[in-house]
Image (cartoon, grey):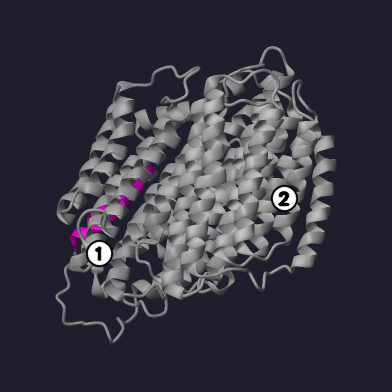
């Protein structure tokens, strides 16, 4: 029951991320998405978690729901922008695409041959839609910061795919993956600030000096 | 023990470099660590291989081959890095600890460490982690100049490669799911070797899903078309020694992941599927690279597209089962392309432009640099007697022996296009009259210090074309056996 509720909320959060123009609400969206996905990893798991498992989940939650969103909010403030006014794909169309993607994820998850012990296909669908939301933000938004948020959303989705399919990697590898994501978003933030200093804007589609 | 030293030295040196105030000491550190790394790799070669079954980190023949290439390139380009840093001194108040140059040095040493980790990792998860870490370590080096173009290139590189590698993580998850259907494999550690040994019990549908995601994911990092878009930008905007490392060391690492995954599918009996995909992506990359080489006006982008072409050749070799030729070609390409990017750096330093129309008469301005530029061009196009000719020919022979005539035809056609395209650019650059703005009064030295590392690299490629030493042949043969999943 709880997992159904979490999945429903997750679908809504992802749709919200498709449709919002305000960047701070996009950051809140990705934080909430991470929180719900961590919850889902706990709820959908059969059997008790070891204390290492709990520690790792809380660190993941802390990094993805608090540290990274706070870092992004600060980068946003220093860049001095609030909203993405003219995205490459309009918000109404985005929302429509979001609905189609939701349907597609549910359908695709039902098609996969599932191993024993895997969670409800809906959990896999939730992971898929989070990944696709991230990819969509990367290609359809022009502000560098929206793309960084998209990357984080995509990583959130990939992260929950493993518990959804009853795959449990070794802790050291999972920690390494988390570290990579953290450093990755950090370096993206630094480059965004340099872009801001150099160009006075962070519109990626206006960075078009390099082409053939 | 030796492996640990090899792995940890670059990371420790990288951390230390952040705290060093003197630019000179930091620059010496890069050279010292690179040569130490090379010495360790050579010592490992002479010490012989140890069994790697069940280990997460270890040295099999395949990793040893790629490790030697990487070490050699780092050692060769370390001098050019020092020259570059000397030529781009920051103002006095921006030097010292944690300065931009200190961060650059740290990134470069971390890059060496993470590529070593990627080469040594035999576990799918550790490998993923290492490959993503190489992206993160190299992005600050690309944006070193903080110009608008280098920032644009660094952003594209970081974002496109990170997304690509995230896709490869989906592939890793699918690999992990594929073991869950059979009691013999349930709970198996996800080492490449272990998976290949139990390949017959893995779930074929999930294996296919895994390979598709891993090919697209690591293929992005390797520069296979159509995921290559970051590559020309990053290679042209990065400092030249960094371009040499990206092209010669980094692309190979990503290729290693694809190779090791392909071995699992071949052993599982669905090699036709993965080999077909590899050949398709390989031919696509070669053709696209040939097309863009024909209309290139920037000599560093020219070299970048040539790297895409050669990554295509490697993918085709892997798909056609030309293991020996493919690995030999990976070696030849890395050495040649490393040399070419170092020469390009020297030319850029002399002319201050990357435009192929403005740079003329290199051979008069700097005779040895011009000669090396031509020799490198001949080597990269696979003209005999260079080693690239031997390896490309060996790949083509296998294509013919397998009856893949269409692939062979496109392969040959593209090689021709690339040759013509590069000829039209390289020859006018080398010969012709030097531009009038160029100070012709400067005394012409036949051989400058900057020419020595590329000269050494090209001599090795030339030597490999006429004579393959027995230990090397043995190493490549063993590595080819690893490619078969043994």
Does the magenta segment cover residue B225? no
B378 or B290: which is nearer to us?
B290
Q: Residue furthest bottom?
A: B436
Secondary structure found at label 2: helix
- Write down the residue under mark 1: B368
- Write down the residue under mark 2: A13
Residue B174 appears at what percent x and percent y?
68, 32
Residue A64 appears at what percent x and percent y?
55, 44
Residue B205 lies left or right of residue A59; in this view the side is right
| Residue B16 visible | yes
The chain identifier of the residue carrying mark 1 reads B
Residue A148 appears at what percent x and percent y?
56, 56
Residue A115 lies left or right of residue B483; in this view the side is right
Residue B105 appears at what percent x and percent y?
28, 51
The chain identifier of the residue carrying mark 2 reads A
**What residue lies at 35% left-to-right and 37% top-to-bottom?**
B68
Label placed on residue A48? none
**What residue lies at 64% left-to-right and 65% top-to-bottom?**
A22
> What distance separates the C-alpha of mark 2 from that of mark 1?
62 Å
- Secondary structure of the magenta portion, mostly? helix
* Image: B400 above or below B299: above
Residue range in magenta is B447-464
The 10 Å Cα crowd at callout 2, few under 14, some 14 to 19, many 20 or more, is many
């Amino acid at each position: 029951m709880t997992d159904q509720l979490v999945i429903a909320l997750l679908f809504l959060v992802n749709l919200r991320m498709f449709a919002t123009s305000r960047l701070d609400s996009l950051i809140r969206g990705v934080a909430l998405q991470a929180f719900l996905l961590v919850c889902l990893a706990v709820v959908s798991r059969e059997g008790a978690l070891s204390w290492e498992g709990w520690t790792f989940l809380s660190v993941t939650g802390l990094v993805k729901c608090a540290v990274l969103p706070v870092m992004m909010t600060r980068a946003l403030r220093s860049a001095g922008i609030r909203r993405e006014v003219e995205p490459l794909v309009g918000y109404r169309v985005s929302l429509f695409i979001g609905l189609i993607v939701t349907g597609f994820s549910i359908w695709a998850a039902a098609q996969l041959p599932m191993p024993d012990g895997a969670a409800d296909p809906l959990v896999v669908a939730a992971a898929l839609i989070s990944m696709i939301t991230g990819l969509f933000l990367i290609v359809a938004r022009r502000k560098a910061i929206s793309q960084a948020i998209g990357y984080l959303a995509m990583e959130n989705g990939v992260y929950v795919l493993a518990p959804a399919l009853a795959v449990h990697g070794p802790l050291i590898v999972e920690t390494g993956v988390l570290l990579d994501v953290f450093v990755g978003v950090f370096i993206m933030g630094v480059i965004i600030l340099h872009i801001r200093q150099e160009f006075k804007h962070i519109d990626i589609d206006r960075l078009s000096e390099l082409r053939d | 023990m030796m492996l640990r030293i090899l792995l940890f030295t670059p990371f420790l040196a990288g951390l230390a470099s952040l705290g060093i105030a003197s630019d000179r000491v930091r620059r010496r550190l890069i050279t010292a660590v690179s040569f130490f790394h090379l010495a360790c790799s050579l010592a490992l070669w002479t010490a012989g291989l140890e069994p790697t079954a069940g280990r997460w980190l270890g040295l099999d023949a395949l990793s040893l081959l790629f490790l030697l290439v990487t070490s050699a390139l780092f050692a060769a380009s370390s001098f050019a890095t020092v020259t570059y840093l000397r030529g781009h001194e920051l103002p006095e108040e921006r030097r010292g600890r944690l300065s931009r140059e200190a961060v650059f040095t740290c990134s470069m040493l971390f890059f060496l460490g993470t590529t070593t980790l990627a080469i040594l990792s035999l576990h799918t998860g550790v490998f993923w982690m290492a490959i993503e870490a190489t992206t993160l370590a190299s992005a600050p080096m690309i944006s070193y100049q903080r110009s608008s173009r280098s920032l644009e290139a660094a952003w594209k590189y970081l974002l496109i490669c990170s997304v690509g590698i995230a896709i490869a993580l989906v592939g890793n998850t699918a690999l992990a799911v594929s073991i869950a259907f059979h009691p013999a494999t349930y709970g198996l550690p996800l080492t490449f070797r272990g998976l290949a040994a139990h390949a017959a019990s893995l779930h074929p549908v999930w294996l296919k899903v895994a390979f598709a995601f891993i090919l697209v994911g690591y293929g992005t990092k390797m520069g296979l078309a159509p995921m290559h878009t970051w590559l020309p930008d990053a290679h042209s905007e990065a400092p030249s020694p960094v371009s040499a490392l990206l092209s010669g060391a980094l692309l190979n690492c990503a290729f290693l992941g694809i190779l090791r995954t392909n071995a699992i599918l071949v052993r599982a009996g669905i090699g036709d599927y993965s080999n077909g995909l590899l050949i398709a992506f390989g031919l696509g990359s070669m053709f696209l690279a040939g097309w863009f080489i024909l209309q290139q006006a920037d000599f560093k982008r020219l070299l970048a597209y040539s790297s895409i072409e050669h990554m295509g050749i490697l993918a085709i070799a892997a798909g056609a089962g030309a293991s020996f030729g493919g690995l030999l070609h990976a070696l030849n390409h890395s050495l040649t392309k490393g040399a070419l990017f170092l020469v390009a750096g020297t030319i850029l330093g002399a002319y201050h432009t990357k435009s192929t129309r403005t740079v003329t008469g290199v051979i008069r301005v700097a005779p040895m640099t011009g000669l090396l530029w031509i020799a490198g061009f001949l080597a990269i196009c696979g003209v005999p007697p260079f080693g690239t000719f031997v390896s490309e020919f060996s790949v083509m022979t296998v294509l013919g022996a397998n009856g893949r005539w269409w692939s062979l035809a496109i392969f040959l056609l593209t090689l021709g296009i690339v040759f013509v395209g590069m000829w039209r650019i390289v020859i006018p650059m080398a010969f012709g009259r030097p531009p009038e703005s160029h100070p012709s009064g400067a005394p012409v030295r036949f051989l400058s210090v900057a020419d020595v590392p590329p000269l050494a690299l090209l001599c090795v490629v030339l030597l490999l074309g006429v004579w393959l030493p027995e230990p090397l042949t043995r190493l490549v043969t063993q590595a080819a056996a690893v490619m078969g999943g043994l």
